[in-house]
Image: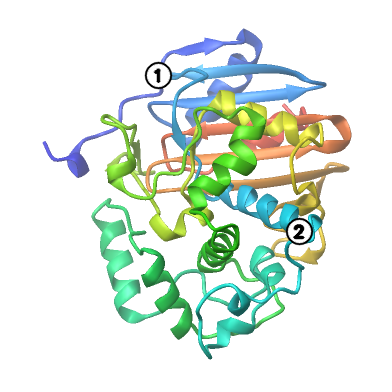
Amino acid sequence: MSASASRAPGLGPAGGDPDLIARVEPLLREAGLRDRASVVHVKDRQSTEAHFGAGPDTVYEIGSLAKTMTSLLFAEAVEAGELTAESTLGSLLDLRSSQVADVTLEELASHRSGLPRIAAGPRDRVAALLAVLRHRNPYTADAATLLAQARTARIAGRGSFSYSNLGTALLGEALAVRAGTGYPELLDRQLFGRLGMKRSSTPLSARDLPPGAPTGWSAGGKSEQAWTLNAYAPAGGVRSTPADMCRYAQALLDRRVPGLDALEPRWDADNGSRVGYAWFTNCIGGADVTWHNGRTGGFTSMLALDRCRAAAVVILANTAVAVDEIAIRILLDAI
């Protein structure tokens, strides 16, 4: 049987905190999660976990949650005086006289650059669509291709919120070039190493994955190829574990993360949200919830913070279905 034809197993056996398991298991099943899922709840520096077919060190693709990490790198560089919010992309990357050269790094970090979600060239779009339909990785552009895509990109609606993977990829590339290193090495040095996130990594291609690297399932239950995002890694190429993401969440609550100013909401986004540098904030049930989610072909993720109550919820799963509402319900004790 081919990988794309195989079917997902049911949600795996539960382990962890019995109360949290009882709260989340029916919600996960109702959402359509299969195979592996992990839920971490942090409150007042204490964490509880519920795992299904998984454990604290199970590896998941975290998708666009990687954008929050890229935004922290940017905010730290600004705080250190190495860059300014108004530094332009063209001052760091070879973009020649293209429209995108004048876009600021702050506009990229806050999705206000006017860049499209992904490269808008017909060939790029067709290739990405075919990959998705075939349950393959659509993000194969290397750094040279990314720059070529940027040079031909058209800016529309600059200054208004419009979510852009292309924009975050360019932000991460610019930060890495300024630091004189690759993006994975920069993230390892500035974030993973500092926080003790020893199982987190940023594989750029399938060659960087260990044998038997975990894969996931589409919402319809089809097996998906691993997504290694190459030059788009700053927008969604990180793999992590529940234990490491618990460390990340706790460090955010403890204000031990470099570039924490990235979380502060500054501009209007979609659906009543405010956006800072990548991070979204919504007022829900009287609480300010700071959050970001992620989804790849076969994985989903959500990190929600209630910084005033020192609480956080992380959900990771290897089924590509939304878990945002579940995370927020747990965070706000609404169930």
Left or right side of 48 for 51? left
Mark 2, secondary structure of its residue: loop
Q: Amino acid at mark 1?
A: Gly
Name the image quarter holding residue 258: top right
Q: Which mark is residue 276?
A: 2
Q: Nearer the viewer, residue 40 or 58?
A: 58
Left or right side of 195 for 200? left
Q: Residue furthest front?
A: 180
Q: Quadrant of the N terminus?
A: top left
Q: Which residue carries the number 1 mark?
A: 12
Mark 1, secondary structure of its residue: loop
| Residue at horizontal 64 percent and vertical 79 percent from the top | 103
Q: Is residue 126 visible?
A: yes
| Residue at horizontal 18 percent and vertical 41 percent from the top | 5
Say whether disc 1 or disc 2 marks the residue closer to the N-terminus: 1
Alpha carbon separation for disc pair 1 and 2:
37 Å
Give the mark toward the camera: 1 or 2: 2
| Residue at horizontal 70 percent and vertical 45 percent from the top | 291
Task: Please provide percent x and percent y for residue 118.
Answer: 46, 69
Left or right side of 124 for 245? right
Name the image quarter holding residue 40: top right
Q: Is residue 225 visible?
A: no
Task: Please provide percent x and percent y for residue 177.
Answer: 54, 63
